[in-house]
Image (cartoon, rainbow, N blue to C red):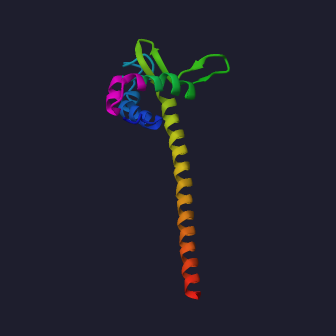
């Protein structure tokens, strides 16, 4: 069974594929309805990860939208993923996507650092045990 891609993998793939489209937006000659909402091709992203398109759509629309979208004080909703933004279909809010990637990378690095320190402590404990056993055997 194929493992589903992580949130970070999905978001990084979207970022890599669509950053140039986001950065090249021009208000004088707009290529999409809004600068911050960038339309994506869910099918292409799903093919990249070799999963069914509904897996990627569901992660964006149901999971990541509720995780990173939020309500403004005036009651309006800030969407992470929009079914439509103007005439564009399946759009991600690119600045929010970049923030989500930074947050996920920070969390990953924090966990990796914890694992690294735990591994180092385990190695020192094991080495200490070996030294103690060797010292005991020399006395015996």
Q: Position of residue 100 (x, y in %)?
A: 52, 34
- Asked if residue 36 can be seen in this view, the reply is no
Is 109 one of the magenta-colored residues?
no
Q: Which residues are magenta?
A: 43-56
Above or below, 109 against 53 in this view is below
Above or below, 134 against 35 in this view is below
Q: Residue at x 55, y 44 (%)?
A: 107
117 left or right, relative to 24: right
Q: Residue furthest right?
A: 73
Residues 51 and 103: in front is 51
Q: Quadrant of the C terminus?
A: bottom right
Q: Residue at x 56, y 54 (%)?
A: 114
Residues 129 and 20: in front is 129
48 left or right, relative to 88: left
Is 46 one of the magenta-colored residues?
yes
Q: Residue at x 43, y 22 (%)?
A: 57
Q: Position of residue 96 (x, y in %)?
A: 52, 30
Q: Determine the image quadrant of residue 16.
A: top left
What kind of secondary structure does the magenta stretch mostly adopt? helix
């Amino acid at each position: 069974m194929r493992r589903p891609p992580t949130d970070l993998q999905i978001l990084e793939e979207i970022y890599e594929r669509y950053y140039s489209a986001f950065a090249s937006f021009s208000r004088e000659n707009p290529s999409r309805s809004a600068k911050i909402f960038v339309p994506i091709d869910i099918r292409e992203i799903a093919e990249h990860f070799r999963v069914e398109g509904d897996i990627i759509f569901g992660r964006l629309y149901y999971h990541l939208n509720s995780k990173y979208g939020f309500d403004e004080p005036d009651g309006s909703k800030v969407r992470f993923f929009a079914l439509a933004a103007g005439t564009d279909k399946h759009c991600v809010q690119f600045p929010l996507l970049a923030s989500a990637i930074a947050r996920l990378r920070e969390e990953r690095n924090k966990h990796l650092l914890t694992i690294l320190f735990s591994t180092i402590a385990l190695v020192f404990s094991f080495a200490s045990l070996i030294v103690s056993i060797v010292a005991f055997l020399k006395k015996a």
